[in-house]
Amino acid sequence: MKSVLMCATVLVAAVSLAGCGGTAAPAVATATTTPAASTSAASTAPTTNAPPAADGIDGTGIAAKMVMALVKAGSGRYDMVSSGAAGGQQVTMTAKSEFVVVNGAMDSKATMSVAGGSMEVVSVGGVMYMKGLIKSKDGKPWVKIDPNGTDEFSKRMAPQLKSAADLRSQVEVYEGSKATLIGTDAGVRHYRLTGVSSAPAQPFDIYLDASDLPVKVTTKSDSMEMTITYSGFGDAVTVTAPPAAQVGPPPAM
C-alpha cells in the first residue's frame, strides 16, 4: 500500500505542476486560463473544421504566445481531472487550483483528491509542499520537495520543479513540435500539437481564446489522460508556504 501511495504522490506532484506550470507530459502545455463562459463554449459546442496548414504550424511560436499571455494575466484558476497508472493500479485524480505569476515564475496552491484520499499541494519559489496521503520523514504534516534536494523524491521531481520556476524556459519543450488548427468555434481555436519533445508520440489538444490564453487542455496516452479547464484570469490570488514548524523532508521511497 505504501508503494501505491508514494507512486500516487509522485503522480500528484507531476500533474499539479503540469496544470499550473506548463510542462508537457505527463500533462501539458502552458497553464493559462480564460473566462468561464469561453470554457463552456470550448467544451460543449461543436467545432467548425478548418483545413490544416500543409506542413503544420510551429508549435514553439504558439507556446511562446501562451506563456507571454499567462505572464501578462498574472493569475488564475483551473480544474483538472486526470487518470494514470501508479504502483500497478489505475489512479483517478481531481484538482482545484489557484495560481499567481511572481517574477516570471508560477506559485500555486491546490486541493486534490487521489487514491481514496485528499492532498494539499503548494508550490512557492520553485519548492513544492504536499500535505496528505503521506507524512514527512520526521512525521510532520507537510512534505517539502526541493529541486536541489538529495532524497529520491526530490531528485525525481527536480526537472519539473525547475521548469515550473521559469515559465519562459518552458517554451523550449515545444522546439520542433507542430500544431494543426483543427477548427474554430466562437473565437476559440482548437490546436493539436504533436512532436513535443517530452512526449513525441502523444498529442496535446489546446483550445485558445482570442488573447492566446488556453480555455481547455486535453491529452491522452496509453498510460494516462487529463483534462484541464481554466477560469479567473486576474483574480486576486495569494500563495504562501506552510509554517516551517510543520514542514519536514520526504519519506523514503
Image (cartoon, rainbow, N blue to C red):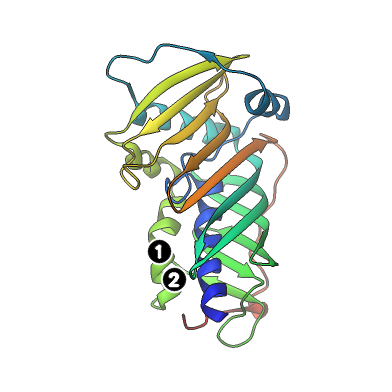
- Number of numbered markers: 2
Crowding near the residue tagged with mark 1, few <14, some 14–19, many ≥20 C-alpha atoms within 10 Å: many
For residue 173, above or below residue 63? below
For residue 172, above or below residue 1? above
Q: What residue is rendered at 43% in x and 28% in y?
A: 192
Q: Position of residue 5 (x, y in %)?
A: 57, 73
Does any portion of residue 250 appear in the rendered image? no
Q: Give the secondary structure at mark 2.
A: helix
Amino acid bearing label 2: Ser
Q: Which residue is mark 1?
A: 158
Q: Are marks 1 and 2 in contact (CB under 8 Å)?
A: yes
Q: Quadrant of the N terminus?
A: bottom right
Q: Give the secondary structure at mark 1.
A: helix
Determine whether, in the image, residue 73 is placed left or right of residue 28: right
Location of residue 38 (image quadrant): top right
Does any portion of residue 161 appear in the rendered image? yes
Q: What residue is rendered at 58% in x and 51% in y?
A: 82
Determine whether, in the image, residue 253 is placed left or right of residue 83: left
Q: Which residue is mark 2?
A: 154
Determine the CA span between mark 1 and mark 2. 6 Å
Q: Position of residue 242 (x, y in %)?
A: 66, 68
